[in-house]
Image (cartoon, rainbow, N blue to C red):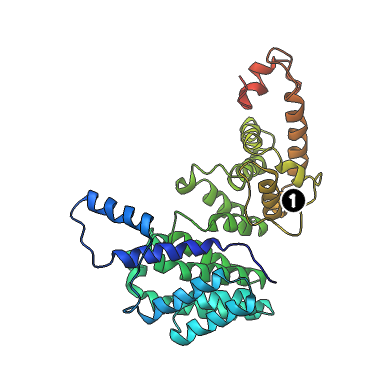
Amino acid sequence: MGKKKPDVRGIEKDISDLKRAMEGREFESKQDVDKFLKNVINNGLSPKTKSLKALDKAQDLVYDAWEEDEPEFRIKLAEKALKICPDCADAYNLLAEETACSIEEEKALYEKAVKAGERALGKKIFKNNIGSFWGFIETRPYMRARAGLARCLWELGEHEQAIKHYREMLILNPGDNQGIRYVLVSCLGTLGRFEELEELLCGSEYDGDWSPHWLYTKALLIFRKEGRSEKAEEKLSEALKQNCFVPDYLTGKKVISSTLPDRVTVGGDDEAMCYASDLLMTWLKVPGAIDWAREKNIIKEKLAKVGRNDLCPCGSGKKYKKCCGIIMGSS
């Protein structure tokens, strides 16, 4: 209750205002655009307000609500927005966040938000903008609503419906600004749907993803198939190199907090805790995987104290630089 953290969604107001200010203007050159933007930086925006559509006015009220400290004021602004335009999905999203007393109530409000978003956007945008959906600011309230609805469905045990929403959201927006792919990894892993999990992780769409959700889970999938193979060892070493804290949470050396952070540090302890919170159940489904992670982490800690020309602690009889030093990227 009371004063809240700044809402990161508030930046969309600036984007919306800039878009409105540019409507109807014709720029003959890049210099004209630069001049316009320089004037905006120096003098601020003067967006059109008189000719705004009802949906735009309603959305502006939600922007204002996000900046309010008191929940009661946020709720009043959301309710006012819906009186102006019942197609304002973000108003329903806000009410789901602020007023729902049960997961069922929350789900019902997100369902209304999704339908409102569909009405506001129209069928054409779903056909013409698959693959770049998030790039249009008008689509974001709908995508937020759908993510909220999918989460509620998952918590209510309606797993297939939740996964269906997540998959369709990734089709609409494969760039995945919302991090839906990480939620889907957690869902598939929790259900033990390893083939589907492998298909998602090994697809070309997110080949460059270096998050724990990708690296550690890929290592787990290889271990599940091959045991402690060279390929599995290399992948786990790669994961450890990116975030060395994950095994501490998987093995219980560190406790996973019941309250997870809103933001994480890449390669940090908080990122590791969030990964373990999402994927611990998946690791537990693979016999021997937790022990493997524990032993690999112990070896890694020993390697940190080994010289390049010392015998490798793994017991191979080779020098470190010719053995695990290669895998750990230390040679």
Q: Is residue 225 left or right of residue 59?
A: right
Depth order, front residue of 143/20? 20
Crowdedness of circle 1 by 10 Å Cα count: few (<14), some, many (20+)? few
Q: Which residue is mark 1?
A: 284
Residue sitting at 51 percent across and 63 percent down?
Answer: 9
Total count of labels:
1
What residue occupies the far top of the structure in this picture?
Answer: 309
When the figure is inspected, residue 95 is found, relative to residue 241, above or below; the finding is below
Residue sitting at 39 percent across and 66 percent down?
Answer: 16
Depth order, front residue of 123/283? 123
Using the rendered image of the protein, determine whether residue 161 is visible from the camera's viewpoint.
no
Q: Position of residue 51 (x, y in %)?
A: 31, 79
SS of the residue at dot 1?
Answer: helix
When the figure is inspected, residue 86 is found, relative to residue 317, above or below; the finding is below
Residue type at the position of mark 1: Leu
Q: Position of residue 291 (x, y in %)?
A: 78, 40
Q: Position of residue 294 (x, y in %)?
A: 77, 38
What residue occupies the far left of the structure in this picture?
Answer: 28
Quadrant of the frame with the N terminus: bottom right
Residue sitting at 52 percent across and 66 percent down?
Answer: 164
Q: Is residue 299 left or right of residue 35?
A: right
Quadrant of the frame with the C terminus: top right
Q: Quadrant of residue 181?
A: bottom right
Using the rendered image of the protein, determine whether residue 252 is visible from the camera's viewpoint.
yes
Q: Position of residue 135 (x, y in %)?
A: 39, 59
Q: Quadrant of residue 161?
A: bottom right
Q: Is residue 205 left or right of residue 109?
A: left
Residue sitting at 52 percent across and 44 percent down?
Answer: 209
